[in-house]
Amino acid sequence: MTTGVRLSDFDHPAIQEKAKELTSGKSTVIDKVESIFSCVRDEIQFGFPSKWDQVKASETLQYGRGYCNTKATLFRALCKAIDIPARIHTGLIEIKIMSGIFPSFVFPFLPSSGGHSWMEIEVDGKWKPIDSYINDKPFYEGALKRLQESNKTTSFSISLSKGVSSCEFNFGEKGFVHMGAVIDDHGTWDDYSEYISSEKYIRMNRMQLMSYPILAKMSNRNIEKIRV
């Protein structure tokens, strides 16, 4: 299977304009990446668009809403637009991280794990992982409070099972958001469409695809209740 579409459409005028806007006056790679990070974290609120995974970066920018895979696609496009080396790292994540987000009745119909992605940025010749942009800060703070009150380590789009969590700009020194729930490594890709075309990608069945728009709406309502 091949999508035939580059999802990180860095040459789209809206992406080009946004990348230049975000990095204007920034002299170092770190300063530029941090500005892109802040945009992807907070200007793109955590949530689910009406399409699953095959969402272009320019579409996510327009929607103002995204989750791990679509935010990574946007992050990579913004970096690519200004020639910052960046790639998408994929793997499997425990679905239970979406408990409190997805309605409880859907979990018996879902696999125990699903596709996930985060970013890697090349800084001083080394690839550094980052995922703390996935949850926008108001949602993250509300979700962390609920997670702590639940006495669980993984729920509400946060995992503490492998250490502390953070939504701040960092390459793991302060903590990640989802890494604690990642259970398999599927490698790195220049574009998420390449991962979708691979045998490693877990595709929704027909019923799941038909049900997804309803699931997205219900999940987004739950997210709004959590966001502070």
Image (spheres, grey):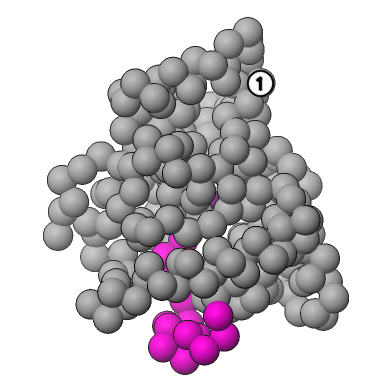
Q: Is residue 187 visible?
A: yes
Tally of numbered discs: 1
Q: Which residue is mark 1?
A: 31
Q: Which stretch is magenta?
A: 103-118
Q: Is residue 82 magenta?
A: no
State the residue in front, 71 or 163: 71
State the residue in front, 224 or 201: 224
Say above or below: 187 vs 87: below
Q: Residue at x 15, y 45 (%)?
A: 4
10 Å crowding of disc 1: few (<14), some (14-19), many (20+): some
Left or right of 85 on screen, residue 227: right
Left or right of 38 on screen, residue 50: left
The C terminus: image quadrant: bottom right
Q: Position of residue 188 (x, y in %)?
A: 40, 48
The N terminus: image quadrant: bottom left
Q: Residue at x 48, y 67 (%)?
A: 217
Q: Is residue 107 magenta?
A: yes
Q: Position of residue 12 (x, y in %)?
A: 32, 26
Q: Residue at x 62, y 42 (%)?
A: 41
Q: Position of residue 154 (x, y in %)?
A: 68, 73
Q: Position of residue 161 (x, y in %)?
A: 72, 71
Q: Amino acid at mark 1?
A: Asp
Say above or below: 178 vs 154: above
